[in-house]
Structures are given as C-alpha cells and as structure tokens.
Image: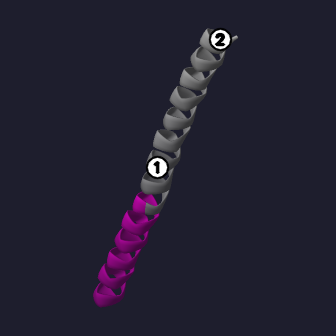
Amino acid sequence: TVIFVTGFMSVLLGVNNISRQAILYPSRTLLSLYINMLLMLREHRNFSYEYS
C-alpha cells in the first residue's frame, strides 16, 4: 500500500507539473502574442492617422 501511495503521489505530482506547464506556457505565449498584436494595431492606427 505504501508503494502504491507513493507511486500515486508521484504520478499526481507529474501530472500536476505537466498540466501547470501546459497551462502556463500557452497562456504566456498567447499573452505575448496579444500584447504584440495590440502594439501593432496601435502603431498601425497612428500610422493611418498620420497618413490621413
């Protein structure tokens, strides 16, 4: 039972670690993409304002 519990805990920890990375990394990349998109849109708007 002790081996089973420790194995279960290690599996849980591994899944938790993987899921945390899977949640963190895409959200971080999506956030950076979103920020870059906002900056690009702002620059594009300023550019179009200067042109018109």
What stretch of residues is rendered in magenta? 1-21
Task: Count numbered badges in the picture.
Answer: 2
Residue occupying image coordinates x 50% and y 33%: 35
Which residue was labeled with disc 1? 29
- Front residue of this view, candidates 4 and 17: 17
Q: In this figure, which colouring scheme has been used for the structure?
A: one colour
- Front residue of this view, candidates 16 and 39: 39
- Front residue of this view, candidates 21 and 33: 33
Which residue, as the protein is rendered here, is positioned at the far front?
51
Residue occupying image coordinates x 49% and y 55%: 26
Asked whether residue 20 is drawn in magenta, I would say yes
Q: For marks 1 and 2, give the one nearer the viewer.
A: 2
Q: Quadrant of the N terminus?
A: bottom left
Mark closer to the chain start, 1 or 2: 1
- The kind of residue tagged 2 is Tyr
Query: Element at badge 2?
Result: helix
Residue occupying image coordinates x 40% and y 60%: 21
Is residue 16 positioned above or below 8 on the image? above
Quarter of image, res 18: bottom left
Numbered label attached to residue 46: none
Quarter of image, res 52: top right
Residue 11 position within the rendered picture, expressed as x and y whole percent measured from the top left: 38, 78
Which residue was labeled with disc 2? 49
Magenta span: predominant SS is helix
Asked whether residue 26 is drawn in magenta, I would say no
Q: Is residue 29 left or right of residue 1?
A: right
Label 1 and label 2: CA atoms lie apart by 30 Å
Query: Element at badge 1?
Result: helix
